[in-house]
Amino acid sequence: MLPFLKIMVRNLIFGPSTDPFPFAPAKTHENFRGCAVFDPEKCILCGICRHVCAAGAIQIRVNEEGTGMQYLLWHNSCVFCGMCAHYCPTGALTMSSNWHLTHLGEEKFTNCISSFIHFGECAQCGAKIQPRPQAIVDKLGPRSPERFLLCPKCKRESIAKHVAKVHSITTQDRP
Ligand code: SF4
Ligand code: SF4
């Protein structure tokens, strides 16, 4: 049988092998990298995503009042490399299989992830620190030392006290 006849017969029996999109959802491969998704509840404003983004699609900027940071990710500039999601330490950034990114030219600057994230407070002195989302504290569980909730200064003091205590214990134990 001629090849095209074979295909016709196969399609008549099994139906077409192409996607019926837009009349039904199009199938995407499980590893397909589409639109990035951001969860502000998990972001600790570490800036790693911005650092690894070769396309310059991510901007993180302190607001004028200094109360937090504006997080922006432009879908138009993103090249779907997935580096930001790969290096994000908290899972705040993930790549979805959504490829429906068509939009009008005038929407190119608004077609983005835009989220404001408030700074956290040091559990000891109240100084502004990067946020410590409860979702991350819960995830760390018993591995989360109290120092995780401290500012760098209080953290240093806490470590120094701990070292001094350990040192005095070991010195006392000496014969
Ligand atoms: S997927 Fe790649 S290009 Fe897109 S925002 Fe993340 S690092 Fe940047
Ligand atoms: S999204 Fe992830 S990598 Fe980017 S600043 Fe937030 S926690 Fe850091």
Image (cartoon, grey):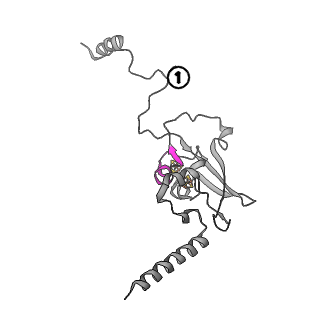
Q: Is mark 1 within 8 Å of ligand 1?
A: no
Q: Is residue 54 left or right of residue 68?
A: left
Q: Amino acid at mark 1?
A: Pro
Furthest residue in direction right, as rendered? 65
Residue located 61% across and 67% down the image: 151
Furthest residue in direction left, as rendered? 1
In the rendered image, the vertical position of residue 12 relative to residue 26, given as above or below: above
- Which residue does the numbered mark 1 point to in the structure image? 22
Residue located 50% across and 57% down the image: 52
Range of magenta residues: 78-94
Residue 88 within the magenta-colored segment of the rendering: yes
| Image-quadrant location for residue 172 | bottom left
Q: Secondary structure at mark 1?
A: loop
- Count of numbered marks: 1
Q: Residue 50: horizontal and vertical position, in percent?
A: 56, 56
Check disc 1: other Cα within 10 Å, few if <14, some if 14-19, many if 20+: few
Residue 42 within the magenta-colored segment of the rendering: no
Task: Indicate which quadrant contains ligand 2.
Answer: bottom right
Residue located 47% across and 20% down the image: 20
In the rendered image, the vertical position of residue 131 relative to residue 111, given as above or below: below
Q: Residue 173: horizontal and vertical position, in percent?
A: 40, 83
Of residues 103 and 88, the one nearer the viewer is: 88
Q: Is residue 56 left or right of residue 15?
A: right
Q: Residue 132: horizontal and vertical position, in percent?
A: 59, 57
The quadrant of the rendering that contains the C terminus is bottom left
